[in-house]
Image: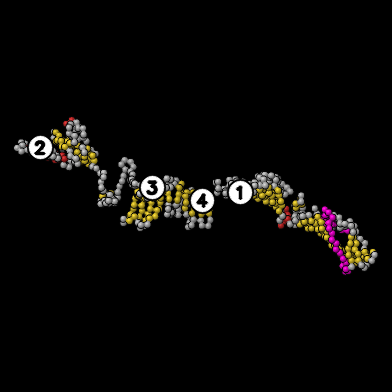
Amino acid sequence: MPDTTPNLAMPYILPAQAQKHVTHNEALQIIDAVAQMCVEAVDQNTPPAIAQNGQVWAIGSAPTGVWTGRAGHVAVHAGNGWLFVPVQDGWRVWDRASATLQVYRDGVWAPLPMDQLSGLGIGTDYDAVNRLAVASQASLFTHDGAGHQLKINKAAPVDTASLLFQTGWSGRAEMGLAGNDGFAIKVSADGALWSEALSTVPATGQLRFPAGALLPAGMADDPSLGIEGDAGTGLFSPAAHQIGVSTGGIARAVVTDTALHLSVPVTGPAVTQSPSDATPGRLLKVGDFGVGASLLLEDFTQDIAPGLYTYLEASAIGAPGSGAAFSGNAIVSQTTGGGCVIIAARRAAGTDLRVWHGSRTAATGPVLWTELLHQGRVLGTVAQTAGLPTGAIIERGSNANGDYARFADGTQICWRDLVAPALAVTTARGALFTNATLTVPSFPMPFVAAPSVALRGGFTASADGWLTMNGSPTTTTLTNGVMRVYAAVALTEDFRWGYTAIGRWI
């Protein structure tokens, strides 16, 4: 029979043993030390200089001093000496030094193993899916000296790593990585039909709102969608069916269902940069190209940007007109060939108002002007320059020599009606009677060449008389010969006669 017990190595009381109390007391000391064992430290290799009765140390792998050769034991200070108890696999001790529960396994002391647990239920039971189950009013995860991370890992992008929020064990909201690697938030009203409220683009961090976003109306000084660090700047809705943009707490633009209201000037590359900026697609500001202002054009022969201009007829190079001291307005448009088309109008009252059409096929050079006749230029003084009319279309007048009409194409008509009172047609001339010669009239306006003349005449009371003349018309008179009246019988009475002459004034 062995002298000690197999586990705690407590000494047996042998038959006929003297001083049995010594052996019994040693066994009690061992039980006192290892039952509910609490050690001062584990893996202690050096015996303490001072120890109290009953204190226990778990000896390390390289003991020294009186502990030499006692690796794998616990040392119990008993009075003036040490009791050594060999440690068995699975023994557990409370380590005062580390305040941990230590387990002896395979010759090593280590904290109580928590790995590879099948599950853990705190205040409730765990199951095969919910291996960690907690029933409490709250759960606290805090830092251990700095930060703290709660990690939820999944095996592949198509799997799910998320937090699910439930009501009565029915899902109402879920956030995390559900089916892909883009963080998303989904919500449900019944746990069956889900809507994605927010999703992210992992590569850029951009947010998507698949179901849209609802913002409060806000105000100009407190917009519903603002800019961080810039109070009063953002988007707001001043009223129903309206959206506004504010900066510095003031509404700068408001779009309604009928209009766009702006309270700031429109600037930047979207609008014209100068009075002659012809960049395609830019908005035209008031004042540019003469719109709402005066853009003076000083040379019509140079390359001209399209627009509205004013000009001075007397000083603008290549301007239309006679160079009189008039100002005018011009509209310029460009052609695809680099030339331009111009409509110019003299600013003057009455018949001095004139309008011209000008064009050229090159970017620079003289402009070919053609005057456009208008209502105010139909009647007036006709004129021509190099075969082109430069005055009115029709000129009508009269003087002591009769009436006349001149036309812009050069045609001139002169006419006159006269009366020879008590004309005596009594001088026999063969079988007829005649009078002394009538006075040859002058035309009211001269012709440039002898016109064609038609005569008319007759007595006021008799149908027996007629008018004749010899010679040819001149540029200023009806004939270079004489004029007489003939009748079949001798008559003395009033004779009415006249003429119409048609020719050219230029």
Q: Residues within 10 Å of mark 3 (few under 14, many from 20)?
A: some
Q: CA distance from mark 1 to mark 2?
A: 120 Å
Residue 390, x across and y down, in percent: 75, 52
The residue positioned 89% from the left and 60% from the top of the image is 469
How far apart in space, not on screen, are marks 4 and 1 (Cα)? 23 Å
Depth check, mark 1 against mark 2: the one in front is: 2
- Pointer 2 with pointer 4, Cβ within 8 A: no
Q: Position of residue 211 (x, y in %)?
A: 42, 54
- Say few, some or many: other residues with alpha carbon within 10 Å of mark 2 (under 14 / 14 to 19 / 20 or more): few
Give the Cα separation between the discs numbered 2 and 4. 102 Å
User: Is 443 within the magenta?
Assistant: yes
Count of numbered marks: 4
* Residue carrying label 1: 287
Q: Is residue 376 above or below residue 58?
A: below
Would you say 348 lies left or right of 418 here?
A: left
- The amino acid type, in three-letter code, at marker 3 is Asp
Q: Amino acid at mark 4?
A: Arg
First in residue order: circle 1 vs circle 3: 3
Closer to the N terminus: mark 2 or mark 4? Answer: 2
Residue drawn at point x = 24 percent, y = 42 percent: 113
Q: Quadrant of residue 399?
A: bottom right
Secondary structure of the residue carrying tag 3 is loop
Q: Position of residue 419 (x, y in %)?
A: 87, 63
Please give the residue where the numbered disc 2 appears in the rendered image: 3
The residue that mark 3 highlights is 181
Q: Amino acid at mark 2?
A: Asp
Pointers 4 and 1 in contact (C-beta within 8 Å): no
Q: Residue at x 44, y 46 (%)?
A: 228
- Give the foreground label among 3 and 4: 3
Magenta stretch in the rendered image: 438-463
- Residue placed under numbered mark 4 in the picture: 252
258 horizontally vs 371: left or right: left
